[in-house]
Structures are given as C-alpha cells and as structure tokens.
C-alpha cells in the first residue's frame, strides 16, 4: 500500500515543529532584549524642542546655574520647567527680535506655555524625588550627563531599575559636596570612593534598596 504522505512531508513537519518551538521560546527573549535597547529606552537620541535652546551657550558660555531655570530641584520631587517670563528676563533685552525666539515671544504675549517635550520619562509606577537626591550630594551630571556640552538635550543614562539600584547600593561612587551639585566639570581632589564615603557619613546617606523606596 502506498504511503499516505510523501517522505519529504516528514522533514516539513519537523521543520514546522522546530519553528513553532523557536517562536514560542524566542519571541519573549527577543522582546526582553528589545525593551533594553538604547533606542527603546530613549538613550542617546536628542529630543526636538519647539525652541532651539542650546545648553552649551546658556550653561557653558553664559555660566547660568541649573537652578536658575530648574528652580524647584532643591525643594520638590520635580526639577521644574522655566516659565516664559523667566526666559524673557533675558530675552526681553537680548535677541529680542530673533526669529528663533518667535515661539517664546508668542508664549509671553498670549500667556500659553511653551509645549516642551520631555527628555527623561520614568514609568508612572516609579517615584523619583529630585530634592532628596540633590540634598544628599548627587550632582546633576550623575543622571543627566554633561548637559553643558549638549546642543540638544538627550537621555544619557538608561534609567532602568538595575541602573538605579547600582547607585543605591553604592552611593559613595557618585556623592559630591553640596556646593558642587550643579558643577558639571567637578572632579574630586582625592579618590572618589574616599570622598564619597566621607560625604555618605556626613550627609547620612542610606543604601535604600527596598521596593517601597521607588514603588509607592
């Protein structure tokens, strides 16, 4: 009696079964790898803004302190976005006819705030407090990188749970004096770990790694 299926159908069946197994096992692995890529995390990609604000000019050239624009960073969970009136403190006098600043003038005249695009985005289930980090010796550059060298700001750190825990387990690797928090170019005059351990004791920094530290 002739075979019901040709011999090559066995190879096809084995190939289909192998493909299904690879798909079932490989798809979750591929998705887990994808969510950790810099592209998905937004890491290293400059964000377009409605106004071409160049931090190199404002911070490096003009010496404007981070806290002038982000005035809430020392007392609030959020750093704060500068109001248009704050921008006009300078630009009512300087470059007050520049086409690049037309959105700023329009915002000032109409009272509608500038729709800045967020660069650093944490999930809604993550609680982060700028004030406690700044008040305990974590400098802006530790999380945001050398913003003073960026024509357009981009996310430097991955902002993943593992990245946060690396710092929380050993905060002495990043601690600096409070008067150097906004100094992007600061370097310790001694080994960082030596300085960090001293500051950790002085500021009462704890190694906060419990779930409720960030998930409340």
Image (cartoon, rainbow, N blue to C red):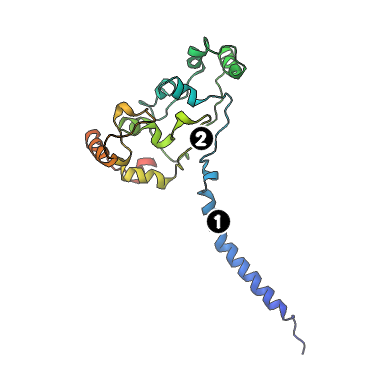
- Mark 1 lies on residue: 30
Tell me the tag on residue 16.
none
Label 2 element class: loop
Judged left or right of residue 171, residue 32 is right
Judged from the image, the secondary structure of the residue bearing numbered disc 1 is helix
Q: Position of residue 25 (x, y in %)?
A: 55, 63
Residue 79: x percent and y percent?
42, 27
The answer to whether marks 1 and 2 mark residues whose Cβ atoms lie closer than 8 Å is no
Q: Residue at x 56, y 11 (%)?
A: 96
Task: Say if 93 sits above or below 47 in the image.
Answer: above
Residue assigned mark 2: 154
Within 10 Å of disc 1 (Cα), the crowding (few <14, some 14-19, many 20+) is: few
* Nearest to the observer: residue 58 or residue 32: 58
**Dot 2 alpha-carbon crowd within 10 angstroms: few under 14, some 14 to 19, many 20 or more:** many
Residue 108 in which image quadrant = top right
Q: What's the residue at 39%, 36% (across, down)?
A: 142
Q: Nearer the viewer, residue 13 or 82?
A: 82
Q: Position of residue 65 (x, y in %)?
A: 40, 22
Label count reads: 2
């Amino acid at each position: 009696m002739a075979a019901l299926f040709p011999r090559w159908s066995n190879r096809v069946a084995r190939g289909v079964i192998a493909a299904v197994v690879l798909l079932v096992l490989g798809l979750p692995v591929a998705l887990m790898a994808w969510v950790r890529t810099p592209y998905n995390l937004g890491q290293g990609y400059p964000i377009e803004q409605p106004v071409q604000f160049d931090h190199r000019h404002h911070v490096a050239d003009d010496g404007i302190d981070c806290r002038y624009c982000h005035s809430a960073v020392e007392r609030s969970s959020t750093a704060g976005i500068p109001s248009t009136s704050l921008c006009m403190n300078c630009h009512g006098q300087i470059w007050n006819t520049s086409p690049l600043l037309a959105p700023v003038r329009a915002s000032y005249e109409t009272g509608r705030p500038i729709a800045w695009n967020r660069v650093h985005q944490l999930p809604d289930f993550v609680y982060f407090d700028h004030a406690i980090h700044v008040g305990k010796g974590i400098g802006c550059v530790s999380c945001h990188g050398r913003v003073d060298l960026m024509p357009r700001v981009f996310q430097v750190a991955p902002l993943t749970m593992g990245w946060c825990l690396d710092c929380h387990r050993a905060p002495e690797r990043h601690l600096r004096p409070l008067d150097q928090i906004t100094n992007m170019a600061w370097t310790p005059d001694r080994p960082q770990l030596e300085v960090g351990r001293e500051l950790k004791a002085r500021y009462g920094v704890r190694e906060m790694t419990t779930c409720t530290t960030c998930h409340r």
